[in-house]
Amino acid sequence: MGTGFAADASEKEKEFLNVAHRGASGHAPEHTITSYKMGEKMHGDYIEVDLQMTKDGQLIAMHDETLDRTTNGTGQVKDHTLEEIKKLDAGSWFNEKYPEKANPAYKGLKVPALEEVFQQFGKNANYYIETKSPEVYPGMEEALIELVNKYGIDKDTLLVQSFSPASLTKMNQIDPTVKLVQLMWYTSPAAISDAELMSIKEYAIGIGPNSSMIDQEYVQKTVQNGLEIHPYTVNEKEEMKKLIQWGVTGMFTNFPDRLHKVQKGR
Ligand code: G3P
Ligand code: CA
């Protein structure tokens, strides 16, 4: 048996979330099964999945509303069927953009449907899923819950995040057992009020602000109000260390291997 302090510290370490942002997207093309697998191997606790919805109502893992940046296709996701999107190459752009990290195996990687992600990683994996642009995709929350239920995804290890309070409150109405995180985007140094925290606490278990605009007071106020705080997107060791010192309860990173080393004091 350890001391009370040790038990608390180890409990704290267990709870701290290393979120592989778009998978290990600093090493491999974002939102591919390869990137997600790498995230797991590199000690990411959660696979982060951004959702878009196709013309035929299928949820896919993609950050942008358009196909242009991360595939060899063009145009809006909502104007293409899943079958059309599955024909695209979602890996070659990475080799071209990051020649020092290029790998011939990335060429021809496919855009995964959320369904495939669930099939690949199973019901007990930790998923941190974002409803992106929910105003563009009516019904995406229902579609998400339908797949979560179809694949028996463990709701203890599922987190759903969004910048849209409307999307999260809708999720909460559809299934109050799903844990939610409110994302925040600040363009200048930010403070958060008690009233704001109380209002978020009505439906969410935590918040996810952009890391560069928050300070220690912001972090501590959030934690003291009983909310988790997972800043994004933290890729440099010094920033990881600073945020951990401030008391964040996890963070999103493109380099889960780097964050793991920091967690281990290396
Ligand atoms: O979901 C946390 C973070 O990923 C939000 O920003 O644009 O990378 O989805 P974005
Ligand atoms: Ca995201």
Image (cartoon, rainbow, N blue to C red):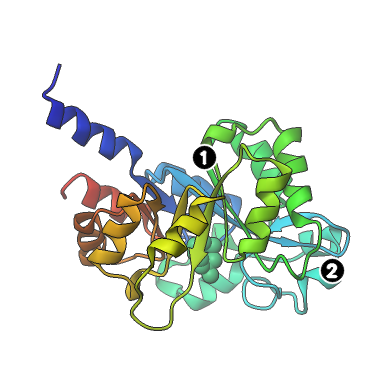
Dot 1 amino acid type: Asn
- Whether residue 155 is visible, yes or no, is yes
- Residue beneath the point at 73% across and 44% down: 174
Q: Name the residue under label 1.
A: 126
Mark-to-mark CA distance, 1 and 2: 29 Å
Q: In which quarter of the image is the N terminus?
A: top left
Q: Residue 80 carries which label?
A: 2
Q: Look at the numbered disc 1 and give the secondary structure of its residue.
A: loop
Task: Specify whether 196 is left or right of 243.
Answer: right
Q: Nearer the viewer, residue 68 or 246?
A: 246
- Residue beneath the point at 29% across and 55% down: 258
Residue lying farthest to the left in this orientation? 3
Residue 175 image offset from top left, x and y in percent: 69, 40
Q: Residues within 10 Å of mark 2 (few under 14, many from 20)?
A: some
- Residue beneath the point at 25% across and 53% down: 247
Q: Which mark is residue 208?
A: none
Dot 2 amino acid type: His
